[in-house]
Image: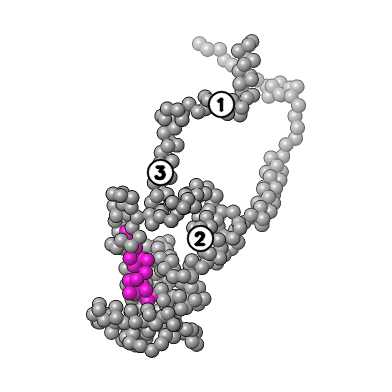
Amino acid sequence: MSARRPKIDKADYYRGIRMTPYDLIKEIAIATVGILVVVLILSAVLSSPDVPSATIQAWAKSDPVDFVTTAAGELSSQTITAQYGPPYTTGSGSVQSIGPIEPQVWAGVHVAVNAALDFVLQPLSQATVGDQTLASGLTTFNDASAAQQQKWLAAYNQALGSAKLVSNEVSVPSGDYGPVPVLMSRLLVLARSGGLDALLLTSDHFYQTDYSKPLLFLSDGGYFRGLAQAQDLTGTQWGMMNETGRYPGQAWLWLFTLWYQVPAIGSASNADLLVVVVMTILSLGLLLVPFIPGVRDIPRWIPVHKLIWRQHYKSMARRTRA
């Protein structure tokens, strides 16, 4: 039978130990206020400026000619998105490969985008209520043969080179464009109202978090690139690691952007895939360091760890001597 442990009196246990009054609530309050002050100061000095979101509405208002030119390109399937390839289309315009390595093709089309239908025709079809001119124009365009549609669009796209803004409307020299000018005029009105932004986000999900379509539409025009250039966010400016202007951004991405600055990679048509391959090889190399002869022995050849843990090694040496 085990002996019972003697009861220890609390006063006797702490006798001889110096006590100091301590207010936990006060300490927490001081620490909270101190952290808040530091955060406010740092946010004022290092924070990112609150740049408004880029929207199709802002684009249509600030550069209507570029918007209409891009929309006509989408309708005639001449834009980057229309010819992109996986994961958006079945084309091959932006497919990158290294020999037989074609990850885009392997993944296939899983974010299907029909530029003409999704960006122009479908939004316009939802705006025909109460607009007989638009409804008639859409019917005429849809009923025309593909050859006739392309003929109208080719003439209109060429005329856009001389487009001017007249009474806040995009005006082109007269020509045989069929119903295309009506479609573009109505799409511009829809975009300026903010309706096109909303229509491109419509999905069967409760939360509208897929911005693929509006971003692809924006990226086909010159407006988006102009914003990036103004904020030092283009690829040649190491845009991935900046937020805006000279403010600090995602510095941990510097290793990815570094490879785009190497001329042999940055100027290649498959630069993105090359960077992915390089980073994959480097990541695998890091994971396999313990198994690579020579590399795994570097800490023994260059014992930097002994400098860092010098106090530990000194105490171990004293114990050994003792």
Q: Which residue is mark 2?
A: 234
Dot 1: element: loop
How would you classify the magenta stretch by its main secondary structure? loop
Residue 211: within the magenta? Answer: no
Describe the element under mark 3 as helix, strand or loop.
helix
Q: Circle 3 is placed at which residue position?
A: 280
- Above or below: residue 274 compared with residue 110: above
Q: Which residue is mark 1?
A: 303
- Give the distance between the C-alpha atoms of the residues marked 1 and 3, in whole angstroms: 28 Å
Crowd rating for badge 2 (residues with CA inside 10 Å; few <14, some 14–19, many 20+): some
Looking at the image, which residue is at 48% across and 26% down? 297
Q: Nearer the viewer, residue 26 or 296?
A: 296
Residue 76 highlighted magenta (yes or no): yes
Disc on the earlier residue, 1 or 3: 3
The image position of residue 31, as x and y in percent, is 68, 45
**Three-letter amino acid code at disc 2?**
Thr
Can residue 186 be spotted in the picture?
no
Q: Which residues are magenta?
A: 71-87
Q: Amino acid at mark 1?
A: Pro
